[in-house]
């Protein structure tokens, strides 16, 4: 028989500890694709219905360690969907693609994902498409047969918020505008100069650098201005010229013949 003074005291269950429960299933948080890219890297999407063209564009861009191709598309519809999924800085679009073409894709990208700049790839004889792309807000225009360096320069310029017109594209656009019934080339140039005459001297300087494909930051350094001041001048230039985007303003600069001289190191 157990002595009463040695009996074990009764213990009550600890009700302060939570009962064990099976962990609830949790959905992983959304990860922005851009978070997986090294800082400062330009993310690019390529869209062309010809695999060899896509491979060539990818190979050229791969020569720049600061550029990464994150997706490829074979038509405009797929390009728009992949831009939504990958959020690239720049979309390089062929003008002619089956189904949704490059012009339609550019318009949709600029409408729904304005942070992605659009560069159009064209061939000779597609001047009408170039003019339509200008109206859709495309910021860069390159000829497929152009120099590889132009592709890299164009992507970098558009990623930096600038407009880039291949010299060959600019020349063809100006010549095409002159042959569309809007007047002879001399008339187009005179009209452009008249429009430019309404700008202030500083706005004219800014426009000339827009025509040279420079970003706001580059213009600021060239003209020794604050970048915010350049941005204000660009907005004023677009409004005074009656154009919707930097690429269209660049065309006016080419027509008026007011491109800036090259930097001193390039002379």
Image: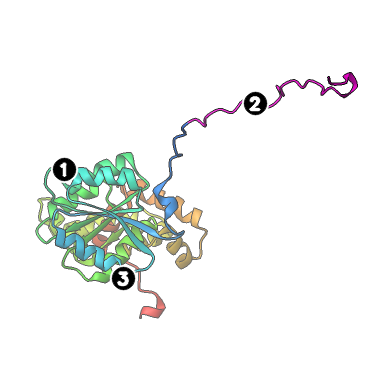
Marks 3/2: CA–CA distance = 59 Å
To which residue does mark 3 refer? 63
Task: Tally the marks.
Answer: 3
The image quadrant where one finds the N terminus is top right
Q: Nearer the viewer, mark 2 or mark 1?
A: 2
Instruction: Where is residue 134? Give x, y as percent.
Output: 23, 50
Marks 2/1: CA–CA distance = 58 Å
User: Magenta stretch: dominant SS?
Assistant: loop
To which residue does mark 2 refer? 18
- Crowd tier of the residue under label 3, counting other residues whose Cα lies within 10 Å: few below 14, some 14–19, many 20 or above: few
The image quadrant where one finds the C terminus is bottom left
**Which image quadrant for residue 213?**
bottom left
- Mark closer to the chain start, 2 or 1: 2
**Which image quadrant for residue 257?**
bottom left
Start and end of the magenta stretch? 1-24
Instruction: Where is residue 25? Give x, y as percent.
Output: 46, 32
- Mark closer to the chain start, 3 or 2: 2
Q: Check disc 1 and report its element: helix, strand or loop.
A: loop
To which residue does mark 1 refer? 100
């Amino acid at each position: 028989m157990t002595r009463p003074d040695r009996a074990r005291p009764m213990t009550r269950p600890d009700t302060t500890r939570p009962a064990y429960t099976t962990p609830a299933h949790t959905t992983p948080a959304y990860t922005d694709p851009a978070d997986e890219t090294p800082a400062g890297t330009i993310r690019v999407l390529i869209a062309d219905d010809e695999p060899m063209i896509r491979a060539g564009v990818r190979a050229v861009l791969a020569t720049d360690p600061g550029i990464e191709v994150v997706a490829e598309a074979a038509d405009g519809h797929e390009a728009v969907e992949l831009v939504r999924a990958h959020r690239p800085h720049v979309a390089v679009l062929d003008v002619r693609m089956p189904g949704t073409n490059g012009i339609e894709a550019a318009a949709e990208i600029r409408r729904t994902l304005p942070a992605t700049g659009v560069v159009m790839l064209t061939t000779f004889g597609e001047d009408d498409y170039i003019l339509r792309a200008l109206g859709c807000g495309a910021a860069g225009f390159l000829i497929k047969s152009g120099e590889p360096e132009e592709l890299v320069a164009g992507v970098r310029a558009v990623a930096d918020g600038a407009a880039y017109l291949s010299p060959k594209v600019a020349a063809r656009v100006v010549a095409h505008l002159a042959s569309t019934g809007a007047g002879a080339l001399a008339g187009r140039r005179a009209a452009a100069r008249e429009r430019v005459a309404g700008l202030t001297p500083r706005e004219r300087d800014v426009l000339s650098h827009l025509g040279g494909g420079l970003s706001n930051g580059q213009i600021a350094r060239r003209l020794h201005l604050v970048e915010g001041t350049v941005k204000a001048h660009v907005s004023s230039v677009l409004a005074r010229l009656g154009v919707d985007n930097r690429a269209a303003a660049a065309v006016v600069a080419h027509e008026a013949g007011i491109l800036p001289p090259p930097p001193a190191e390039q002379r």
